[in-house]
Image (tube, grey):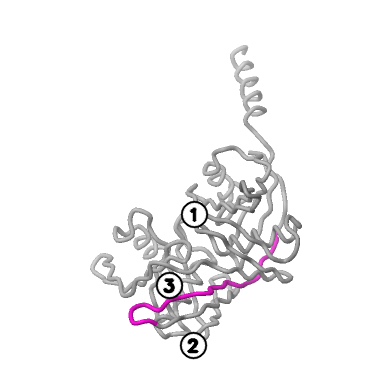
Amino acid sequence: RLIRRQRQMCIRDRGRKDSMKISFVKLSGTGNDFIAIDNREKVLPADLSHLSRKLCQRKYSIGADGLLILENTSSNDLMMRIFNPDGSEAEMCGNGARCLSYLVYRKKIRKGDKVKLKTLSGPLYAEIKDSSVRLKMPDPVNIQRNVKIKVGKKEFNVFYINTGVPHSIIFVSRIDNVPVESLGRVIRFHRHFSPAGTNVDFVWPKDHKTILVRTYERGVEEETRACGTGAVAGAIIAGIENRVTPPICVKTLSGDTLSVHYRLIPSKAIPVIRDVYLEGEVKLVYEGNIEV
């Protein structure tokens, strides 16, 4: 009985020592949902990967496609860090940046309707009007056309592009029957893209102004209802292949739409892409506190 009592006291004491209450905001960018935490005062524990794995679990915690951390830099700029549900840290996130910019605007963390966020992929600039956020994206790099990827006995023609994070595009003639989970997972871990891996986007150019996109996201390790950098990747590759003309309406799995703008400069090899913008609605879902 004494041992049992001592054990119960230890459990209570450990709970008091290790637990902490965290304030958060849940946001959605066209179905891409995120947990946002203001860490400018360094209130969070050092292990943000572990925190992301705990908080992003659906059914067991808040649940989300990613954890957004707002921090200050030494130059007093705002920094966005994005952690995936598997605990890995991403270079940037288009819809995540739009959501965090909207939060900065909504909470009046910065004056005005323009927000600058530093990321591991470089600075991002957002402009907010009501609930719509227009984000200036980094210029894409490492564009590769007609990459042959073999999966089992079948060969796929893949287009590769980095829009802040790596994406592989596969054009399809129908979007509703694509095996996004199974095929996306195989290509995401394909040796051609090792060691970093790739996001995988299945793109159906519906007409010259519209594409439909479904994405298997690296780090989330499943299909998400929307992907900002994937929408941009699909729209740019479709433009390079003369299937669409910007601005392009991107329809996502959630049913919501994103608008992608860019300037295509023709060249002998691969066209140069400049002035890339991603625009869409952001919704503040709820605010709360969680003890972890």
The type of residue carrying mark 2 is His
* N-term-proximal mark, 2 vs 1: 1
Quadrant in the picture for residue 240? bottom left
Nearest-to-viewer mark from 3 and 2:
2
- The vertical placement of 178 against 17, above or below, is below
Q: Nearer the viewer, residue 76 or 133?
A: 76
- Residue 21 location, x and y as percent? 69, 39
CA distance separating discs 3 and 2: 17 Å
Q: How many marks?
A: 3
Report the front residue among 276 and 239.
Answer: 276
How far is mark 2 from mark 1, CA to CA? 32 Å
Q: Secondary structure at mark 1?
A: strand
Magenta stretch bounds: 267-285
Do the numbered discs 3 and 2 sit on residues whose CB atoms are within 8 Å?
A: no
Q: Residue furthest front?
A: 75
Q: Main secondary structure of the magenta part?
A: strand
Query: In the orientation shown, which residue stands out farthest toward the left?
Result: 153
The residue singled out by tag 2 in the image is: 208
- Closer to the camera: disc 3 or disc 1? 1
Give the secondary structure at mark 3. Answer: strand
Percent x, y of residue 77: 64, 53
Residue receiving disc 1: 90
Label 3, label 1: how far apart the Cα atoms are: 21 Å
Q: Is residue 245 left or right of residue 9?
A: left
Q: Residue beneath label 3, please?
A: 202
- Vertical relation: 60 (above or below) 226: above
- 280 is within the stretch colored magenta: yes
Say if the magenta span includes residue 208: no
Which residue occupies 50% across, 77% down?
Answer: 212
Q: Which quadrant holds the C terminus?
A: top right
Question: Looking at the image, which is closer to me, 6 or 83?
Answer: 83
